[in-house]
Amino acid sequence: MSPSTLIVVGDVVQQDWSSAADMVEAVERMGVYATVASVEGSRLDELEDELFRFQRIVVSQPELRAALTREGVAAEHLRSLVENLLSGKVNSATLALVGEAVTRPRGRTLEQALEHFGQLVAERAQHYVAVVRAAHVLSEAQQERLRTALSRKYGRDIHLNIEIVPEVLGGLSIQVGDEVIDDTIAGRIAEVQRRLAG
């Protein structure tokens, strides 16, 4: 370990923690922050985008997910697999965080670990992440209007992670933290069906 890492870990260990899990969470958070510190300005958005895109790839590719989450496989082998998949395609911070999510999920699914790291990156960048589900690609102007409206609503800069989901038919579903705004055609149809059934 580097001398600065020893100092930080020494300080963490000396604190009073309500549980060992809280201490591990704090160390993990500092590790993510240290990784983020190597990324400047607009590259933070790139880091968030790359984590989000990789999470969506994992969700849509069951064979890849199975290979990355197979039990009993050495961490070195899994890290090598991640490097073979992503090296030269993503920035080094993304590669490091995906490697951590794969080799040390700490009781989370791979998707949850990637989402957690994405949230920590957003927190460090001092903005919120809005996961937007739309039936069609949004133009730059539409994205900017949405970003501005959400920033006004939440009082903080918003980073958009846009997922194209044809099943929503039209409109948008927007999730910021635990809050979901569903203004999709599919959502409206489902609401009408619930009312008719009730």
Image: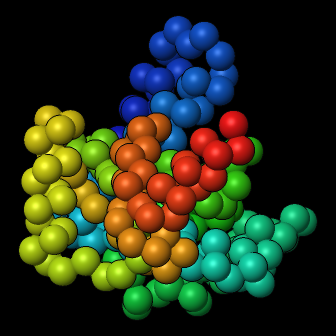
| Residue located at (54% from left, 75% from top) | 167
Q: Where does residue 152 sit, x and y in percent of width and height?
A: 11, 41
Judged left or right of residue 190, residue 36 is: left
Residue 171, image quadrant? bottom left
Q: Where does residue 8 sit, x and y in percent of width and height?
A: 40, 33
Residue located farthest toward the right when viewing the structure as drawn: 72
Rendered view: 74 above or below 8: below
Judged left or right of residue 115, residue 179 is: left
Residue 194, image quadrant? top right
| Residue located at (18% from left, 59% from top) | 146
Residue located farthest toward the front when viewing the structure as drawn: 196
| Residue located at (65% from left, 27% from top) | 21
Rendered view: 60 above or below 198: below
Colour convention of the picture = rainbow
* Residue 193 appears anywhere in the view: yes
The front one of 4 and 134 is 134
Rendered view: 61 above or below 13: below
Q: Where does residue 18 sit, x and y in percent of width and height?
A: 60, 10
| Residue located at (70% from left, 55% from top) | 109
The front one of 180 and 115 is 180
Judged left or right of residue 25, residue 72 is: right
The front one of 146 and 37 is 146
Q: Where does residue 68 sit, x and y in percent of width and height?
A: 72, 74
Q: Quadrant of the C terminus?
A: top right
Judged left or right of residue 71, residue 144 is: left
